[in-house]
Image (tube, rainbow, N blue to C red):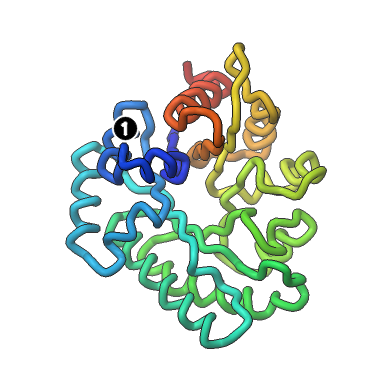
Amino acid sequence: MDYSVCSYSFHRTFDAGEMDIFGYIDWCKEAGFTKLDPWMRHLEDGFADDAFIARVKAAGDAAGLPFGCIAVDGAHVYEKTAVARAANRQKAYRWIDIAAALGATQIRIDAGGRGESWGDIADVVIEGYNDIIAYARPHGIEVVIENHWGPTQDPNTMYKLLDAVDGLGLLFDSFNWPAGTHEQAWPQYAPYASLTHIKTFAFDEDGNEATWDIPKVIRILREAGYDGCWGIEGESPDWDEIEIVTRTLALIKRELGAV
């Protein structure tokens, strides 16, 4: 079994100066994770500095942890103007180059289109993903979309994109669906999953997520044949970030029978 945690889970810890990308790598090794999933904000020093990316790659190698998915913001496919779309496309290409330099196997690129209907942006988004996938494929990198924001967050829309674009994977976030649609979305999208963000906010005294039925999510994924990395994203304004991630890993391992 492979386990990872998106470094976004530690954004408050990073912002406080208590962790950087190198500390994240070391902590993942100590905590029992097997892959690294950096949020691009924690790699931004390397956007124009290949030497920095080489140092990050060397740190991962020293820890014995390969890079999995680079979660990218700000390079989404859809923008209202061709100029803005072209600028984002160049950012996407650069992040793919960085992912390749790190030996990463996946990269998350959002669709965009906040406030837009799927019908109005579909052609642009489909063309864009086809182009980005063609750029990433020679590097052995899978492009994934997350149910993150915009019209593709809707379970009644996301499948239209996934079915239309060959080679586009799904980063299955257990939480990021519109209110009231989770019970529909979990079994509908588990068969598409290439990676997970098992998202957690708080825990009870029995080690269960206090607000969401994470064992049910894991069961649904396993029944759908999911065999990818069990990725985590802790997201709580109240809990210590390290504690919530540690508890989430323990919960996943418990449900998988790995402990």
Residue 237 vs residue 199, the one in the foreground: 237
The image position of residue 215, as x and y in percent, is 65, 26
The image position of residue 49, as x and y in percent, is 22, 66
The image position of residue 146, as x and y in percent, is 59, 54
The image position of residue 33, as x and y in percent, is 38, 32
Residue linked to disc 1: 27
10 to 47, vertically: above or below: above
**For the view shown, which residue lies furthest in the bottom direction?**
82
Q: Is residue 187 left or right of residue 5?
A: right
**For the view shown, which residue lies furthest in the front direction?**
16
Could you say whether the residue bearing mark 1 is in a helix, strand or loop?
A: helix
**For the view shown, which residue lies furthest in the top direction?**
206
Q: Is residue 52 left or right of residue 186?
A: left
Residue 20 vs residue 220, the one in the foreground: 20
Q: Is residue 113 left or right of residue 20?
A: right
215 to 151, vertically: above or below: above
Which residue does the image show at 41% across and 46% down from the upper left?
Answer: 37
Amino acid type assigned to the residue bearing label 1 in the image: Trp
- Crowd around label 1: few <14 · some 14–19 · many ≥20 (10 Å): some
Q: Quadrant of residue 16?
A: top left
Total tally of numbered discs in the picture? 1
Q: Quadrant of residue 79?
A: bottom right
Give the position of the N terminus as an image quadrant: top left
Which residue does the image show at 63% across and 25% down from the upper left?
Answer: 209
Which residue does the image show at 63% across and 31% down from the upper left?
Answer: 218
Residue 53 vs residue 223, the one in the foreground: 53
Which residue does the image show at 31% across and 66% down from the upper left?
Answer: 47
